[in-house]
Amino acid sequence: MKKVGVVGIGHTKFGNLSDYELVDIMAYASLNAMEDAGIAGGIDQVVVGNMGAGILNHQTGIESALVSTLNLEPASAELVSNGPASGSSAFKVGYMAIASGMADVVLVTAGEQMRRVTGWEATDFVATLSHPQAEYPYGLTLAAFGGIFLRAYMERYGLTERQLSMIAVKDHENAAKNPFAHVQLPVTLEAIADTRDAPVINPYVAEPLRMYHICPVSDGAASVVLCSLDAAQRFKKKPVPVAGIGSATDTHCLHSRKDPLDLKAVRLSAERAYKMAGVGPGDISFAELHDAFIILELCLAEEVGFFKKGEAIKAVEAGETRPEGRLPINPSGGLKAKGHPVGASGLSQIHELVKQLRGEAEEGRQVKNPKYGMAVNFGGFGNNVVTTILAQPR
Amino acid sequence: MKKVGVVGIGHTKFGNLSDYELVDIMAYASLNAMEDAGIAGGIDQVVVGNMGAGILNHQTGIESALVSTLNLEPASAELVSNGPASGSSAFKVGYMAIASGMADVVLVTAGEQMRRVTGWEATDFVATLSHPQAEYPYGLTLAAFGGIFLRAYMERYGLTERQLSMIAVKDHENAAKNPFAHVQLPVTLEAIADTRDAPVINPYVAEPLRMYHICPVSDGAASVVLCSLDAAQRFKKKPVPVAGIGSATDTHCLHSRKDPLDLKAVRLSAERAYKMAGVGPGDISFAELHDAFIILELCLAEEVGFFKKGEAIKAVEAGETRPEGRLPINPSGGLKAKGHPVGASGLSQIHELVKQLRGEAEEGRQVKNPKYGMAVNFGGFGNNVVTTILAQPR
């Protein structure tokens, strides 16, 4: 199999981009990535990651639309979807295109536009990934899943609301230094966790889950250029090697799992990625973990083997997961504060891995000399998870 | 790269399956394919092909839903979309998963459910693949594209309506022998092309395109099991080798093409598939060509090199494209009569290639000792085309 590396990255600001067309948002990130790679064409294959253009934009065929907008015909083009893990799945397909010999240079671009519809419509849209008979018709939203999950975790491990809010404080601090972040507003623990003010500033969305424990609804796109490592010298920057990719599914319905706190697909996707990369949890320098609900930052960090079950919060309290800490988590601000345009988030995580591994992150959030970066992209409510490990450029 | 073969195929009847759930339709075809391969599990990767579950079914995440319905966790799962070429694109991604070493056994299942919505909604849905600013808002439907295209072809090459209708007669005859076909009703040339009765029996949809020149709106699914040729001996049947896959894009808008009759992406996707397979048009024993509008059967046959431009109709008139002819085209009945559940059609074409290459097609439509079968799956209005060549099992 051919070895694969990332030679270009692009990103739009995350936030409200409802003035623009979805394809134009994707084109912006794509041109950014191509410029970073030092190319204006020569792409064999375009892979678009997207979850909801059908429902949110009443559009299909955006893979062809993007190729045409970028004048990349006759490049092959496919769209890859996997709920909120669409971005990583698109990256995986881009990887496979090169590793299989079907393409030499691949552009992977993932985007989502969620702010042209109302908040309720966006919530309903995300809920369409739940079971169409057993979950969706009963009004279960993803925030409801998050609330159920958080309550179970709190009861089992004794996590407090105040401890949980510390993750939000860290994420907001990182996002404030990330020019692409949707929410660039630092918050204090006092403001969001104080028992007197919290009901007003940080109300419950799905008790015990509060507003500052949840990602915003965002528009945005990220993009990468991939190539075979053999051919990497023709690009402007050193390639960031793809070390490992692993993905795994779990039951579609949360209620089918014996222990809802046991995120098997997370664990297995990470094991597969570690195996392919030939590394273990101790080799990872920093990670981007899918914290659409910040409780997931803890659970994912535990499932992938960084900490024992129930103990990740100690590392947060000790500052170990801050950019200058022992194991920085979500130096980008995470989905929590950087934003979560669902189909784009996985590729945005990978964008951040590349930026950090190249040493190009902004001051105050650059991880010191990272060797391996890991992204865990959580699809469904843990029913389809993709883990990606990238290595330091060489 | 690992060599890849098809070791199992499954198919639902095409037609009105609106009583069933989309995922259950896909599960039916999948179980069929697994049974044909002689396996009940052991799938590493599931690839779902679908164009419109978001718009038509208000569902996302059907890749995870299918895995769970089939109890295939923790298999990896992705959804691949590419308009009406989604089925072939999903097959291509399944191929890449094995060829790249990311998976050993892959289930590719493609399905679409278009009959739960009204005819107008189905027409609108398909039109969402057109340009969102330059085409869609002006009411251009795919049938309108077909009408414009047919008129241009008739004017340039002198094709008559009566000649065109001969293709429908052949397709309906083949479909009548195909148990999976949506329309199993043979028609005579007199009934649909007679100038006195045609206005009633075969009215114009988009002049000069008449009803019998267009595919029906169908529900259905097709499925295949792929594996590395090295590991093929553990399956029940001999593998059908994947010889070549090629795909290419053309401008998103039809009006951006200098000559709208020049289907560059068809030509190029075929050239790429021929190159990978190491064969040429003369080596192909039979073909499934994407005849959503039957004029496309002629144009595609010409673009891939079977006939000179404007001359394919002579072969139809001489009976050469019938199952017993020199170069059978659409022995399945084609999209025209077998039906066209958009996201499923490409994989259904591949299903037919396997069936024919194994010698398992029904009497009266089995091609005699075919060496290579070719499927051309036409996405958008020719803006994203995938060609697949399979070889005789060995």
Image (cartoon, coloured by chain):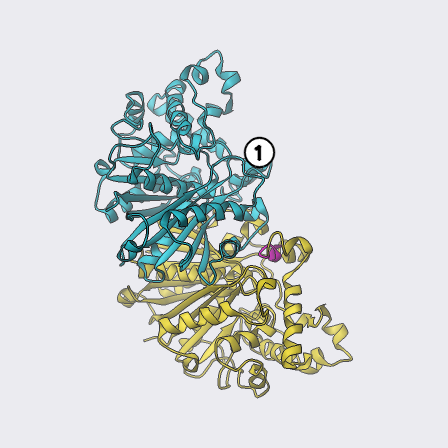
Chain colours: A cyan, B yellow
Q: Quadrant of residue B156?
A: bottom right
Q: Quadrant of residue A43?
A: bottom left
Q: Residues within 10 Å of mark 1 (few under 14, many from 20)?
A: few
Q: Is residue B383 left or right of residue A264?
A: right
Residue B126 part of the magenta segment? yes
Residue A117 part of the magenta segment? no
Q: Is residue B197 left or right of residue B239?
A: right
Q: Please, what is the three-letter code of the amino acid marked with disc 1?
A: Gly
Residue drawn at 68 percent across, 79 percent down: B161
Q: Position of residue A378 (x, y in %)?
A: 40, 40
Q: Quadrant of residue A20?
A: top right
Q: Is residue A359 above or below residue B7?
A: above
Subunit ID for the residue under disc 1? A
Q: Position of residue A214 (x, y in %)?
A: 46, 29
What residue is disc 1 on? A119
Residue furthest out toward the bottom: B318
Q: Position of residue A21 (x, y in %)?
A: 56, 45
Q: Nearer the viewer, residue A3 or A271?
A: A3
Range of magenta residues: B125-130
Q: Is residue A383 above or below residue B114?
A: above
Q: Is residue A82 visible?
A: no
Residue furthest out toward the top: A196
Residue drawn at 39 percent across, 38 percent down: A257
Residue drawn at 21 percent across, 46 percent down: A278
Q: Is residue B320 visible?
A: yes
